Amino acid sequence: MTPPAPSSAISYLFVPASRPDRFEKALASAADAVIVDLEDAVAADEKDVALEHLRAALDGGLSRPVHVRINAADSAWFERDLAALAELPAAARERLAGVLVPKAEDAETIARVHAALSAGPSAADGTAIIALIESAAGVARTREIAAAPGLTRFAVGAADLSFDLDIEIVSSTVDWVYAQLVVESRLAGLAGPIASPPFEIKDLETVEREAVRLRGLGATAQLCIHPGQIAPIHAGFLPSAERVEWARRVVAAAAETDGAAQVDGQMVDKPVRERAERILAQSTR
């Protein structure tokens, strides 16, 4: 099975759709992707004005495309959000990089989002669709969701997931969910899952350590809620200088022989060489 092409995006920064004054500030940050949030970050009485702010930004022009987190399928605003996606004019669609589907629990919801993006004045078949897994029902149907038309990636919302399961946010159960999503993503040819955002905004060393741990579990990116989290997330998900130097020595040693080589007392065979090549590719992001 050919590995999926890795996504170059590592950091996804949320900004409330109700705060249009923050859109360009977020886009000017070092975040790889910006998510304009219509869901949790927006109060119920601000939902309509938040959508108008989003439409105006997409229509009026942004410095780069954005992702949008729509409202959940069981909310009063889901149908409204689907209609808004379907009605976007061509110029606005070009500024829509992706759609996050919160509390994803079935393939039908993903298919409806894909249909909305494929309808209207201009189709947006290239728009990413990310399923945010935040409940036991979503976890139980990950294989079904992975096969939904248009899905490009999974993400994890650990706060809602831990509440639904009555567990701690940092727990072996949540780690098991990451493991399941890593496997299902691999089988479906998707990029590895996006990790849940850190809630620590001052202790950035903790943010980086957790990013390293999540990358080791198989996550390939992370959501974030504050610009200060971007740098430690990048540092945690990208290969360290030591790993890059090891990879260079492995590739160089493998190039000098048709058989097995040794680096640091370790036998360099095909899997080790391929891992080293992947590390070097990731380091040039």
Image: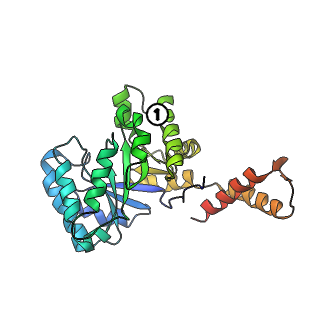
Task: Say which residue appears at 43% left-offset and 46% top-offset.
Answer: 146
Camera-side residue of 193 and 18 = 193
User: Hey, which quadrant is residue 240 in on the image?
Assistant: bottom right
Residue 81 position, x and y percent, is 20, 54
**Where does the image place residue 134, in percent across and percent down from the top left?**
36, 38
Note whether 147 is above or below 283 in the view shown. above
Residue 258 pos. (x, y %): 86, 60
Q: Quadrant of residue 82?
A: bottom left
- Which residue is the extreme one toward the top? 166
- How many labels were placed on the picture? 1
**Residue 45: horizontal and vertical position, in percent?**
12, 47
Nearer the observer, 208 or 57:
57
Element type at mark 1: helix
Whether residue 237 appears in this view of the structure is yes
Q: Residues within 10 Å of mark 1 (few under 14, many from 20)?
A: some
Question: Which residue occupies 63% across, 62% down?
Answer: 281
In this view, 108 is above or below 277: above
Q: Quadrant of the C terminus?
A: bottom right
What scheme was used to colour the molecule?
Answer: rainbow
Which amino acid lies under the numbered mark 1 shown in the image of this protein?
Answer: Val
Left or right: residue 247 versus residue 45 is right
Q: At 79% from the left edge and 51% from the top edge, which residue is drawn?
A: 269
Q: Which residue is mark 1?
A: 174
Residue located at (73% from left, 57% from top)? 247
Q: Is residue 206 visible to the viewer in this orientation of the structure?
A: no
248 up-or-down from 80: above or below: below
Nearest the viewer among 187 and 73 is: 187
